Image: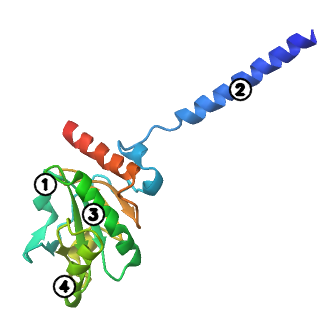
Amino acid sequence: MTRYAFAGLFLVALAAIVYVLISAAGGKAPQYALERYAVGTLEKVDFSGAGQHVPTGSFNGPDGTEADLDSFKGKTILVNYWATWCSPCEREMPSLGALQAARGGDAFEVVAISIDSDEDVDYARGRLGELGASNIAFRHAPLDRGDIVYGANVQGFPTSILYGPDGLELARLSGEADWSAPEAVQFIDAALRQARKG
């Protein structure tokens, strides 16, 4: 009789454990398609601005002429706001260069916008190459005319904002990340798959 009681208790306990595991694994369904890829170095990705259009502000393009983010329509872009006086920005830049090397092309581009002052523009341009990101075109929008920075509601540096080919924000990350990490590349790959379906 005692043997059956222990077997019964064992089965009840096992059923309870299975129920808890299934409940925990099920969890809440992600609200955004990319949310399940926001892990590891990207665990602090913010989706609250998803659906916002690229800001209307301008920046100086690689040749010094004025440009805007609308010119990238049709391409998924990761816009990174950075400065040479920002240590986390400099630490992050080599991984952005690696991401551009791995995924850059007709469908995706890393768009790094320096917010350094006009007096420091030549230094910032050279520093981009020194940081291992010479494959990223130099773009510049100093904070004193930072309509693009304020329009994007950037609160600190570095900030990276992912936009889909329709010019709408998908996600953003305030603070540095390792964009060459496998989970970051998977995040970008997921965004590119989403764009192809869209």
Mark 1, Cα crowd under 10 Å, few <14 / some 14-19 / many 20+, is: some
Which residue occupies 40% across, 49% down? Answer: 183
Which residue occupies 55% across, 34% down? Answer: 25
Residue 171 in sight in this render: yes
Circle 4: residue type: Asp
Circle 2: residue type: Ala
Distance between the Cα atoms at labels 3 and 1? 22 Å
* Residue linked to disc 4: 122
Residue situated furthest top in the rendering = 1
- Upstream in sequence: badge 2 or badge 3: 2
Q: Quadrant of the C terminus?
A: top left
* Residue linked to disc 1: 73
Distance between the Cα atoms at labels 2 and 3? 49 Å
Distance between the Cα atoms at labels 3 and 4? 19 Å
Q: Is mark 2 on a helix, strand or loop?
A: helix
Q: What element carries label 4?
A: helix
- Upstream in sequence: badge 2 or badge 1: 2
Distance between the Cα atoms at labels 2 and 4? 65 Å
* Residue linked to disc 3: 97
- Residue nearest the observer in this picture, 156 or 61: 61
Colouring: rainbow
Which residue occupies 7% across, 75% down? Answer: 63
Residue 198 in sight in this render: no
Mark 2, Cα crowd under 10 Å, few <14 / some 14-19 / many 20+, is: few
